[in-house]
Image: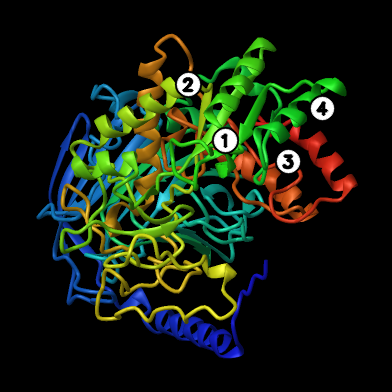
């Protein structure tokens, strides 16, 4: 197999030029000219305060039209966390609905007298309204002097930081544990990418902890599903968000454990996992048959290495289609025998499922889903058709009215055929091997080769720059040519009328939610084990996680430690990296050392 990262030097030069032009655009529009907002009609209560915000001067319209009127709500929902929410007065900006993710905002008791956090606000003639969050008179978040920018597709909130601030969290980005406070840009846009250093990958988590010189920690979380950059530079932390609202939560700490506890109290405590999942797991991509997997299981027993769980990747499927079994190499009969053997030896089986469903009317899972209208659509109402392992594929729309019953029915059929012990949901950023609805109008049996198998692939498409959904005015630092590259296009439409642009980062979370609900209802007295590649705030209440398609290098071994720590902050403690790596071949010494390290991963596979 030949992999070509660049087909010719022209493409490389084009990409470099695009990067330079993007950088020039960003730095030629400094937000210092923006007027900020002026607060009025301020009313206080035992729970916090409410105010109206209006532009403090002529709009700057840096990446669109400034929204003239906003609403500020400050709420002390618990003794140790405080909410500051800035939204458009018209209520048109997208917000994550409670039906998707319900936050535990407390009992609404008045906490003012014994709260660890305080809120204050001020007005500056140049930058307008600003606010501070204090913990026992210590400022932990301070926007005063930094103008608020609030547009349809661009929101900017900036807070001052101490010199050499100690910031931990925000991701998912393979990087060292402490973020560089002087020059770090963390992009949040869920993306299928093989763990590139300091780039956005599979999940989106805006929560961070800061350690102050007095030894106390505090935390902050932005509740927003849009793509964004979070930038650390010039003694500030700056949110640059592609839409929605500025819905901020602050956690008093004062210990690191306190911050994590306060955060998970809000978004959801980690799920209770089965005891067996804490043991050693075995998995790889590329097994040829059940016979080969059986031999691996037997080898563990022969050398007396305790093996708790045997995993199989998409190799077991019939033509890579979900809920099927290869009739020759992984027949259902042989898979049942393997499962019976594992259970007889107090071991378990976990198999993989991808969200992409082959676009084929003779494939039962697709036919039933099509009949129930459960797939993501194009703007014209036709089914959005991408390309994944089985060829042209449709994608479940987790907002669709019938999607929960359809998904549960498909899983029930699957579990009735083979009662596996846990599930692995992959490719749920969602990943697609082409850009746009590439299968629309194409014969189902004429699927193009995967891009990396083609010696001279066609050049990347040139997106319509006049389409602000495909090409937002502000370009976050997503390394792909456009936001829609290798995923569902941002213009795709969900059943509730919301476009993918607003909810892209929620796709894996919503699949996790419906799958977890099925597993806990199907086996009511058994703890569910569910592993997901794509995650969002609150995913820890539903799933465990592995760090994705890493590389067999010492560098990736080292990075895995920081990533495991990151996910502890994110509220997903059951996490680990692929031991010995996924891509490339590990040396014997690297693999031995990685197995030693992997014994300390909460999820060890």
Question: Which callout, 2 or 3, points at the residue further toward the start of the chain?
Answer: 2
Query: Residue at coordinates 44% horizontally, 81% vertically from top-left?
Result: 22
Q: How far apart are marks 3 and 4 (CA)?
A: 18 Å
The residue labelled by disc 1 is 568
Q: Nearer the viewer, residue 304 or 107?
A: 304
Query: Is the C-beta separation of discs 4 and 1 under 8 Å?
Result: no
The residue labelled by disc 3 is 579
For the residues bearing labels 2 and 4, Cβ distance under 8 angstroms: no
The residue wearing badge 4 is: 299
- Indicate the secondary structure of the residue bearing disc 4: helix
Determine which of the numbered discs, if any, sits on residue 528 in the image: 2
How many neighbours does mark 4 have within 10 angstroms: few (below 14), some (14-19), or many (20 or more)? few
In the figure, 504 relative to 453: above or below? above
> In this orientation, which residue lies closer to the viewer: 586 or 87?
586
Mark in the foreground, 1 or 3: 3
Question: Which residue appears at 45% of the width and 23% of the height?
Answer: 417
Give the image location of residue 87, x and y in percent: 20, 52
Whether residue 79 is visible? no
Q: Is mark 3 on a helix, strand or loop?
A: loop
Q: Disc 4 to disc 1, how far (Cα)?
A: 34 Å
Classify the position of the C terminus by image quarter: top right
Find residue 566 and report its horizontal and vertical position in percent: 58, 42
């Amino acid at each position: 197999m030949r992999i070509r990262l660049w087909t010719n030097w022209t493409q490389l030069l084009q990409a470099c030029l695009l990067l330079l032009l993007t950088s020039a655009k960003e730095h030629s529009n400094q937000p210092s000219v923006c007027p900020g907002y002026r607060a009025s009609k301020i009313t206080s209560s035992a729970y916090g305060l409410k105010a109206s915000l209006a532009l403090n001067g002529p709009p700057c319209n840096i990446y669109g039209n400034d929204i003239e009127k906003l609403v500020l709500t400050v709420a002390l929902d618990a003794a140790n966390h405080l909410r500051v929410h800035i939204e458009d007065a018209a209520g048109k900006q997208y917000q994550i609905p409670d039906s998707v993710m319900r936050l535990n905002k407390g009992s609404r008791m008045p906490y003012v007298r014994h709260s660890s956090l305080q809120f204050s606000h001020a007005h500056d003639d140049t930058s307008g309204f600003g606010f501070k969050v204090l913990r026992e008179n210590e400022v932990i978040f301070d926007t005063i002097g930094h103008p608020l920018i609030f547009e349809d597709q661009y929101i900017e909130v900036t807070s001052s930081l101490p010199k050499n601030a100690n910031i931990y969290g925000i991701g998912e980005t393979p990087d060292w544990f402490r973020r560089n406070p002087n020059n770090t840009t963390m992009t949040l846009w869920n993306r299928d990418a093989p763990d590139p250093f300091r780039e956005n990958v599979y999940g989106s988590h805006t929560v961070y902890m800061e350690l102050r010189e007095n030894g106390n920690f505090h935390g902050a979380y932005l509740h927003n599903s849009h793509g964004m950059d979070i930038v650390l530079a010039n003694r500030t932390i700056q949110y640059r968000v592609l839409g929605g609202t500025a819905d901020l939560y602050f956690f008093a700490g004062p210990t690191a454990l306190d911050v994590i506890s306060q955060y998970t109290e809000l978004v959801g405590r980690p799920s209770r996992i089965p005891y067996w999942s804490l043991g050693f797991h075995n998995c790889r991509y590329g097994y040829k048959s059940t016979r080969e997997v059986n031999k691996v299981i037997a080898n563990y027993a022969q050398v007396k290495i305790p093996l708790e769980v045997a995993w199989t990747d998409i190799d077991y499927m019939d033509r890579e289609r979900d809920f099927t079994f290869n009739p020759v190499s992984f027949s259902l009969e042989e898979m049942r025998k393997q499962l019976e053997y594992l259970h007889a030896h107090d071991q378990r089986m976990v198999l993989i499922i991808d969200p992409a469903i082959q676009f084929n009317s003779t494939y039962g899972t697709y036919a039933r889903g099509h009949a129930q209208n459960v797939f993501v659509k194009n703007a014209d109402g036709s089914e959005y058709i991408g390309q994944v392992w089985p060829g042209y594929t449709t994608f479940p729309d987790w907002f669709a009215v019938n999607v929960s019953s359809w998904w549960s029915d498909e899983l029930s059929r699957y579990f009735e055929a083979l009662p596996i012990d846990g599930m692995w949901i992959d490719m749920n950023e969602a990943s697609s091997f082409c850009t746009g609805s590439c299968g629309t109008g194409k014969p189902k049996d004429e699927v193009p080769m995967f891009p990396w198998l083609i010696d001279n692939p066609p050049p990347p498409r040139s997106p319509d720059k006049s389409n602000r959904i495909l090409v937002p005015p502000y370009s976050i630092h997503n390394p792909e040519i456009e936001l829609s590259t290798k995923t569902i296009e941002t213009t795709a439409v969900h059943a509730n009328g919301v476009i993918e642009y607003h909810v892209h980062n929620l796709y894996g979370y919503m699949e996790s939610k419906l799958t977890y609900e099925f597993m806990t209802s199907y086996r009511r007295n058994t703890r569910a084990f569910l592993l997901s590649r794509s995650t969002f705030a609150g995913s820890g209440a539903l799933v465990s996680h592995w760090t994705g398609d890493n590389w067999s290098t010492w560098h990736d071994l080292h990075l895995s430690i920081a990533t495991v720590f990151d996910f502890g902050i994110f509220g997903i403690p059951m996490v680990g990296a692929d031991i010995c790596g996924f891509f490339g071949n590990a040396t014997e010494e690297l693999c031995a050392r990685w197995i030693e390290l992997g014994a300390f991963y909460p999820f060890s596979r």
